[in-house]
């Protein structure tokens, strides 16, 4: 099956750590990621994500993080995840403009940016840009 004639609807492989403080975003994004073939582990905040990651790091192929969260934001969470797995690809999601976010992330490799709200097509593109495993 194709999305807008460009990319396959399925093809993702592995486990993605999804971190967002909004339950509705976690639910919808989990459904999207599952539909394209990924297994999803969801966390509602950065500290929980770091704890999960320390236990499951070998299994997790990518982190999809909300930029703005209470306590530990997405960038700081990613830095802690990369202390465990330095080559972890990531997608940072935010309602802010993509250019503004890219400027803040310019020193972090293998990170793509996705602006909320996003479509399935844009999610797939962001995953591929970050280096997610794709069959």
Image (cartoon, rainbow, N blue to C red):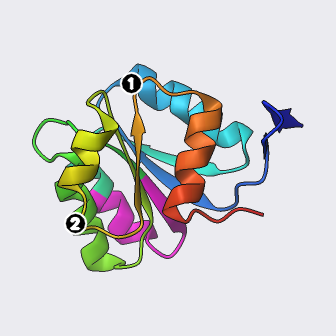
Res. 11 mark? none
Which callout, 2 or 1, points to the residue nearer the camera?
Answer: 2
Judged from this view, the residue extending furthest toward the left is 71
Q: Is residue 134 left or right of residue 108?
A: right
| Disc 2 element | helix
| Disc 1 element | helix
Say which quarter of the image contains residue 80: bottom left
Q: Which residue is mark 2?
A: 79
Q: Is residue 80 left or right of residue 127?
A: left
Callouts 2 and 1 close, C-beta under 8 Å: no
Q: Residue at x 70, y 62 (%)?
A: 134
Q: Find the magenta span and give its range.
A: 50-63
Say which quarter of the image contains residue 87: bottom left
| Residue 52 lies in the magenta-colored region | yes
Q: Say which of 71 and 67 sits in front.
A: 67
Q: Residues within 10 Å of mark 2 (few under 14, many from 20)?
A: some
Q: Say which of 105 and 16 sits in front.
A: 105
> x%, y% of residue 37?
73, 48
């Amino acid at each position: 099956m194709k999305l807008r004639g460009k990319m396959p609807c399925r093809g993702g492989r592995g486990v993605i750590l999804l971190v967002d403080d909004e339950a509705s975003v976690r639910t919808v994004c989990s459904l999207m990621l599952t539909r394209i073939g990924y297994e999803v582990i969801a966390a509602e905040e950065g500290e929980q994500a770091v704890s999960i990651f320390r236990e499951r790091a070998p299994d997790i192929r990518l982190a999809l993080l909300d930029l703005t969260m209470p306590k530990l934001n997405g960038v700081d969470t990613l830095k802690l995840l990369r202390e465990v797995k330095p080559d972890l690809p990531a997608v940072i999601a935010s309602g802010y403009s993509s250019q503004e976010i890219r400027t803040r992330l310019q020193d972090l490799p293998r990170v793509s940016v996705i602006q909320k709200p996003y479509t399935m097509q844009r999610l797939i593109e962001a995953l591929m840009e970050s280096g997610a495993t794709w069959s």
